[in-house]
Amino acid sequence: MTFRLCALLLVAGLCDLAVCHRQDPFLWLSYLRSRWRTHGAMLADTSGGDCPLECECPPSYPVAMYCNGRNLQNVPYVPSRMKYVYLQNNLITGIRDGAFDNATNLVWLMLHDNLISSEALGDNVFAKLSGLERLYLDHNRLNWVPPNLPRTIRELRLNHNNISEISASAFEGMDDLTILQLHNNAIQDLGGALKSLPSLTQLDISSNSLRKVPALLPERLHQLYMESNSIDTVPADFLTKLSQLQFVRLAHNQLTDRGIPPNAFNVSGLVELDLSFNKLERIPPVNRRLQNLYLQANQIKEFSLGSLCSVVDSRNYSHLKVLRLDGNEINTVDWTPEFALCLRLARVIDL
């Protein structure tokens, strides 16, 4: 240690003469670290309470609390300044009423990948979170949709639970809800639970126990995922009522030709249609503006050109870019030049 640095430390009262005489070459580093810790503590925002010891609240982002992956069994105290709380990947089994009443400004609340059951979840746990926009409760043990959810939620994840029934009032008043994930549950019927969601654009109800397409779907739906259910029929007019719907997935169901009314999928707004892994024997008629059509792993025996192009000329042709027909029983011997004209924009054709 130089004499000058030793003198400075002595003046600052950070070492005595004996320490300086030992000339510890790392004393200056310890000094700087202690200054940084003291300075960081002074800058840390502790409004609304200190950060829980089991969590991390970065001074550079004082409105976020990271408690994920800490083997927590209960929800810790949440300071009132918090807007983003991460509690996923823990061992939380239940949440009592009032757990978040001190932090009513929460915007994101991540509770996925825990062990939360409906019986151990208070009826008013989320009731006072008047600004909550994202609530993730997927990969838990819920048997029903939690009551009294904030009406401000925009994205709600309830997938990978044990939900079998949804009451008609479960989402009542949630006018801002845009994304709803209910896949991988045990839902048999949605009834009219979705009719009061005017802003819903993405609905995932795949991998449930549905036997029919839900009635009263929100009119602004843009993406509808229903694969891996037991649906064997579709309503004749369900797509005409959903003028903004562009993506429909019905793969891995029990659809047959008899269960698809004529022109049920012949709507101009549809961009992608997935009917793979069903029991179809014919290609259902689709609109020429459709871009992606998945029909692999069915029982289709012929390539019916009229289902894709009712008229083939310079101005009338299919807009399909991807056509999957592999895993069927189609004979390509009868392929004619008209097929190429009809599918002139196709980049992928699997037969």
Image (tube, rainbow, N blue to C red):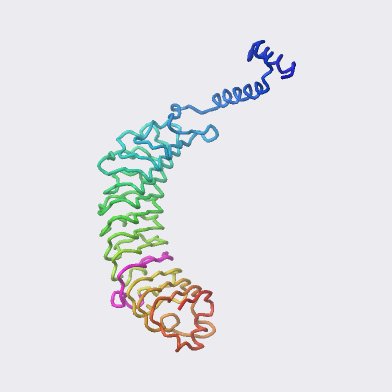
Residue at 48% across / 35% down in the picture?
63
Residue at 49% across / 88% down in the picture?
336
Q: Is residue 227 above or below residue 150?
A: below
Measured as percent of width and height from the top left, residue 206 is found at: 35, 60
Residue 246 is a magenta residue? yes
Q: Is residue 66 above or below residue 243?
A: above
Residue at 31% across / 43% down in the picture?
116
Residue situated in front as seen by the camera: 284 or 175: 284
Q: Which residues are magenta?
A: 241-263
**Residue, far front:** 22
State the image quarter where residue 7 is shown. Answer: top right
Q: Magenta part mainly helix, strand or loop?
A: loop
Q: How many marks?
A: 0
State the image quarter where residue 179 is shown. Answer: bottom left
Measured as percent of width and height from the top left, residue 215 is found at: 29, 63
Residue 202 is a magenta residue? no
Q: Is residue 4 above or below residue 172?
A: above
Measured as percent of width and height from the top left, residue 38 is found at: 57, 23
Q: Is residue 136 left or right of residue 347?
A: left
Q: Quadrant of the N terminus?
A: top right
Measured as percent of width and height from the top left, residue 253 is found at: 32, 68
Q: Is residue 145 above or below residue 221?
A: above
